[in-house]
Amino acid sequence: MAEAAEAAEAAGASEARASEAGASEAAEGISRRRLLGTAGAVGAGGLVLGAAGGAAGYAVAAPDAPTALSSLGATEVAWGGAHQPGILTPLQAKGHLVAFDLAAGAGRKEAAALLRRWSATAKRLMRGEVSDGATAIALDAGPSSLTVTFGFGHSFFARTGLEKQRPDALDPLPPFSSDRLDTKRSDGDLWVQIGADDALVAFDALRALQKDAGAAARVRWQMNGFNRSPGATATPMTARNLMGQVDGTNNPKPSEPDFDERIFVPSSGDGPAWMAGGSYAVFRRIRMLLDDWERLSVGAQEKVIGRRKADGAPLTGGTETTEPDLDKADADGKAVIPVDAHARISRPDQNAGAAMLRRPFSYHDGIAADGTPDAGLLFICWQADPLRGFTAVQRKLDRGDALSAFIRHEASGLFAVPGGPGKGEYVGQRLLEA
């Protein structure tokens, strides 16, 4: 009994000291980035607390010299420059997509004020600063690779009286046979992509931008996604989707000589000047019919995709990055990579060189009434010209992709994403103040 009393007294004293330290730090008004080291120590303490009791937990949670568990939270993505963040940024663990419609009566003036507020908030949060002391959702985290990306939908230009500035490339996408589109979860005047390597940091940004919208705009739709967390594999690897397939092998790379001209709008050309350095984002909510897919054997799945499931290598051999031999036949004279395999049909050299930079998030929105998972891919791809990028490839897939039997396109959007803001600018300023 005496030992228990002493342990309780020690725990109480330790808790008081931790409380005093927390009050002192709050008084200093420290930022999320400065709290990163402490966050690592508290996380470690929390694990011990759950396993061994309060006294041990507090002892570990308040070391004399706390050290960060990792540097993941300290990673900061630059705001501004030639392109907006969130396009070339490596895949992030957590993402939010949200579309807004301007409120009734709101026009160009209100849109400019909103983009000014949003840009200021995004810049601040990407530096790792606290969004709002009233909520303090991500108070004890670093920047965590947060990115915020803004785009304009087709309808935005009529709402703001800027129809003459609307690019031809923003014409609506054509219908496809696999479409089962919900118009309430498609399109929108304004589109925001949020990505981060910490879920609370990403949600903090989503909440801040929603509040910034105020009376100027209302949420049309919002979706949440995720990817494998950085560091979860021993070495960097191409991401996998919820079908278990390596997804993104043939993405164009910035080191390729024609990368910029395929992904970003040039400063000289037929398009409007305000889109220089920008890109066009195609969004598709693609539901995966996972129950049907998982009834297939691994070998049958590999035939549908045209690649090995284990490592993403083509069925004709080699490694993930080996060029597939599309002419190779088996002993029966059949193509090793079937003629309707997804990897064959979607290749750039099978689509007049069409290229798009795929940067998706997986999603899972629970179990439907029939017991099937509402899960799949929040597909996002970037290109200088969606007609020559996504549309060209999707038309080809529409005519005979074996994967089409296992997916359903449920929502869609196309957005013009202007280049990165210059010093002292907000996103879209060259359009809204032209």
Image (spheres, rainbow, N blue to C red):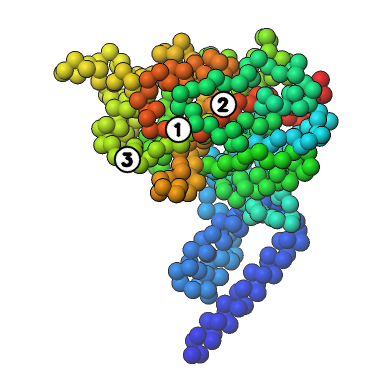
User: Where in the figure is residue 64, as x and y percent of width and height?
Assistant: 59, 65
Of residues 57 and 275, the one drawn nearer to the viewer in this rendering: 275
Could you say whether the residue bearing mark 1 is in a helix, strand or loop?
strand
Label 3 crowd (10 A; few <14 / some 14-19 / many >=20): few
Disc 3 marks a residue whose amino acid type is Glu
Can residue 212 be spotted in the picture? yes
Q: Is residue 112 left or right of residue 15?
A: right
Asked which secondary structure carries label 3, the reply is helix
Q: Earlier in the sequence, mark 2 or mark 1?
A: 2
For the residues marked 2 and 1, what is the alpha-carbon distance in whole angstroms? 16 Å
Camera-side mark, 2 or 1: 1
Instruction: Please give the residue where the numbered disc 1 appears in the rendered image.
Output: 408
Give the residue type at disc 1.
Arg
Q: Tell me the amino acid under the disc marked 2.
A: Val
Q: Is residue 227 visible?
A: no
The residue at 48%/68% (across/down) is 50
Classify the position of the C terminus by image quarter: top right
Q: Nearer the viewer, mark 3 or mark 1?
A: 1
The residue where tag 3 is placed is: 294
The answer to which of marks 3 and 1 sits earlier in the sequence is 3
Image x and y of residue 378, in percent = 51, 35
Question: Which class describes the residues within 10 Å of circle 2: few (<14), some (14-19), or many (20+)?
Answer: many
- Name the residue beneath numbered marker 2: 282
* Mark 2 touches mark 3? (CB < 8 Å): no
Q: Residue at x 65, y 54 (%)?
A: 137
Secondary element under disc 2, as helix, strand or loop, is: strand
Measured in 3D between alpha carbons, the distance from the residue under mark 3 to the one under mark 1, in whole angstroms, is 16 Å
